[in-house]
Image (cartoon, rainbow, N blue to C red):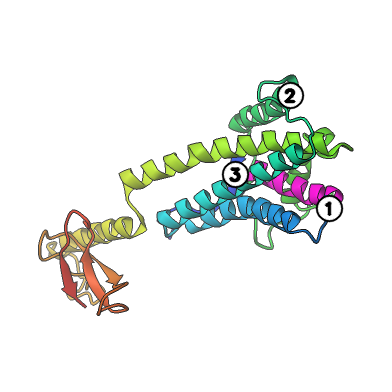
Amino acid sequence: MSKMRPSGGYRDLRSFQIATVIYDATHWFCERFLDPRSRTCDQMMQAARSGRQNIAEGSRASATSSQTELRLLNVARSSLEELLLDYEDYLRHRRLPQWAPESAKAMEVREIGRRQGREDQTDRTDRSDRTDPSDQPDEEDQAPTRIADDRRYALYARWLDHAEPAVRANALICLIHQANTLLDRQIPSLEQSFIEDGGYSEQLAAARLAERQRRRARQTDPSDPTDPSDPSDRIPDCPACGRPMVLRTAKQGRNAGRQFWGCSGYPECKGIAEV
């Protein structure tokens, strides 16, 4: 049986791909140009890591919770914004130049991302997350995901591995702006999808209702030997509107921790029933 809601595939997201380049480049930037014992170094590494890992975690969480996915993507967006300010501060405090957004240098870095995005639209190669033993090394004796990460980093290596810290920091600022722009598009798209399709509980209730209707139709068919007293058909209808109910847990008040049946049409309908 296939999953009701798809999840994973985060390695195919441009936001995750750029966040990976940012994380790797930040690691090497801090290693070379900052005191590894400083709080700034630690915070920059944590922000870069959070930007990448929360995109992956949100993608995996999407199977059961749109709210969790959205929350984690917003955390990733906030972390990258924090990292952006750290690089701007680094340049300002050392009186190093910061490239203007439309300068030739910045445009050159940004064009790499635009070109890669156009190629991704026509490239059907599977870059989905592989986390099982079937992820075998290829002819280069490296995991495919590692090869993809290395090749993507190599596109920016002339800036990100530059001997001058100002060049690295400015290139990273460009990349962070690109990642933030992608997340700023991704988040509203997920919000709209949630509004139109509902969350996991609503979709599960709708699927259950369709199954119940199918069973009822079978029960009216005298040629169908199915036992009408199917013990698994125990989800009650809402006493207020008749829609199927969803098992919920009270989060506060004197009944906190207790389960109850709530209408799948909440908040439009607030019908409840005892378990």
Left or right placement of residue 133 versus residue 252 in this view: right
Disc 1 from disc 3: Cα separation? 21 Å
- The residue tagged 3 is 81
The three-letter amino acid code for the residue at tag 1 is Glu
Residue at the disc numbered 2: 108
Question: What SS does tag 1 mark?
Answer: helix
| Marks 1/2: CA–CA distance | 26 Å
Q: Nearer the viewer, residue 226 or 133?
A: 133
Q: Position of residue 239 (x, y in %)?
A: 10, 66
Q: Is mark 2 in CB contact (under 8 Å) with mark 3? A: no
Q: Would you name the residue on which mark 1 appears? A: 31
Q: Main secondary structure of the magenta part?
A: helix
Whether 20 is among the magenta residues is: yes
Marks 3 and 1: in contact by CB < 8 Å?
no
4 part of magenta stretch: no
Alpha carbon distance from label 2 to label 3: 22 Å
Residue 35, quarter of the rendered image? bottom right
Specify whether 264 is left or right of 12. Answer: left
The x and y percentages for residue 32 are 86, 49
The magenta-colored residue range is 16-33
Residue 182: in sight, yes or no?
yes
Q: Earlier in the sequence, mark 1 or mark 3?
A: 1
Q: Mark on residue 5? A: none
Three-letter amino acid code at the position of disc 2 = Glu
Residue shown at the point (14%, 62%) measured from the top left: 221
